[in-house]
Image (tube, rainbow, N blue to C red):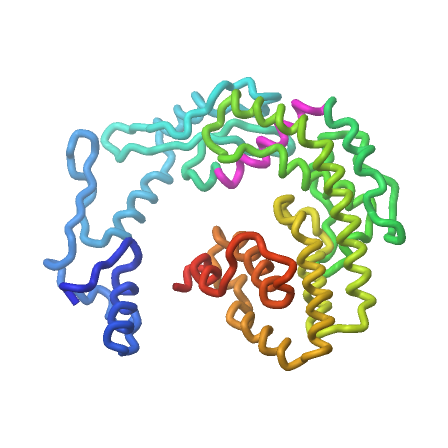
Amino acid sequence: LATEFTPGRGDFLTELAVFISQKYRVAINAEDWPPQSLPDYLRPRVEVVDKKKQTVIVARDLQAIRSTVEQRREVRTDAWDAALLKHERPAVNGWNFGDLPESIEIVEAGELPQRGYLGLALREGDVDVRLFRKPDEVAAATPAAVCRLAERAMAKDLAWLAKELRGLAPRGAASKPAGFHDALSQMSAKLLVPSVNGNAFASDEFLQESAYQHLAAHVFRLEPLLPLTKERFEAMLLKAKKDLPALAHRVRELVGQCHELQQKIASATKRYSGMEQELARLLPGDLLLRTPHAQLIHLPRYLKAVLLRGERAVLNPAKDEDKEWQLSLFKGWESKVPAEKSETFRWMLEEYRVQIFAQELGTVGKVSEKRLKEIAGWE
């Protein structure tokens, strides 16, 4: 083992268990080793030092050290409060706060240095410049705030969008007068979202409002998010102004195609078990809020795959069952796949369904069971 085993960056005991199982065909799990089974003299002694090379923490448990450091960093200090006063700005009306550094160091005498992360956050409709404790907090809060600033900056340019999206619900679906034209700032307000299993085309008003949010989320975003600079923000606005007319037209066309295919599937005589659930998954009541624009353009293909599967399932039920079995490994994936990989996995699984049941429709990129397992971290 010492000669051949080369651990990577993952958990040591997990990788060791896999190596032993594969080499010697003996079923070994990481849990087979009792906790703290190594004597202290075989475990690394870790020291955390400050800038003056003075030791502030000593321990052999790296996770315990990390927990201690995190707890200390969560404590409010005079230096942290001073940094808040210096860097945070409430209720900014536009990008009038210059460029934000990704992080700043905050030093308190005799303590571990802290690092703060600058970003933006929504607060009751206003946008604040905020100092966060962690980078992932910046990533979670900033996109919506960037979108709100962009809406304000392009309010006059967006006046036509309400008219463009009017009557978005296909003919025959329930319709109500649009209720979001008067105040652009209310377009991104909280919506009464229909049930996920509801009719994706039931309300013209909801479709218009969710279509606006769908488009805004697509064009008013910085990719990548950092750095947060005025130059990048203004470049995003120019591109959005150029792209929005064609994108709005595309959304209208895609909604129409999806509605037409929904009706074909609902009235199809050639069906398979679970067809209704497939339709509910692809066309939930909050379709435009749950589906990124990059994936919306593929929905008609996914729906066509459902129709083709229905036709083939009737002709050869046994073969359809065999193909369904290939998907059984991924049932309940929502609770097994890490949250940060959930969206990627979700849409690749849709491509995998197309490859299995309607291969002639083609897939985006290479799709396989192995690739899905890699994304999920199951291999």
Residue in view at x 71 percent, y 66 percent: 308
Give the dominant element type of the magenta stretch: helix, strand or loop: helix
> Magenta region: which residues?
139-155
Q: Is residue 236 left or right of residue 371?
A: right
Q: Position of residue 131 (x, y in %)?
A: 45, 31
Residue in view at x 30 percent, y 56 percent: 10
Q: Is residue 379 left or right of residue 345?
A: left
Q: Position of residue 287 (x, y in %)?
A: 70, 51
Foreground residue among 318 and 73: 318
Foreground residue among 279 and 72: 279
The question of residue 80 being in magenta is answered with no
Q: Quadrant of the N terminus?
A: bottom left
User: Residue placed farthest to the front in the image?
Assistant: 360
Q: Position of residue 178 (x, y in %)?
A: 84, 39
Q: Quadrant of the C terminus?
A: bottom left
Foreground residue among 223 and 68: 223
Look at the picture and state if 181 lies above or below 356: above
The question of residue 147 being in magenta is answered with yes
Foreground residue among 320 and 232: 320
Q: Position of residue 155 (x, y in %)?
A: 71, 24
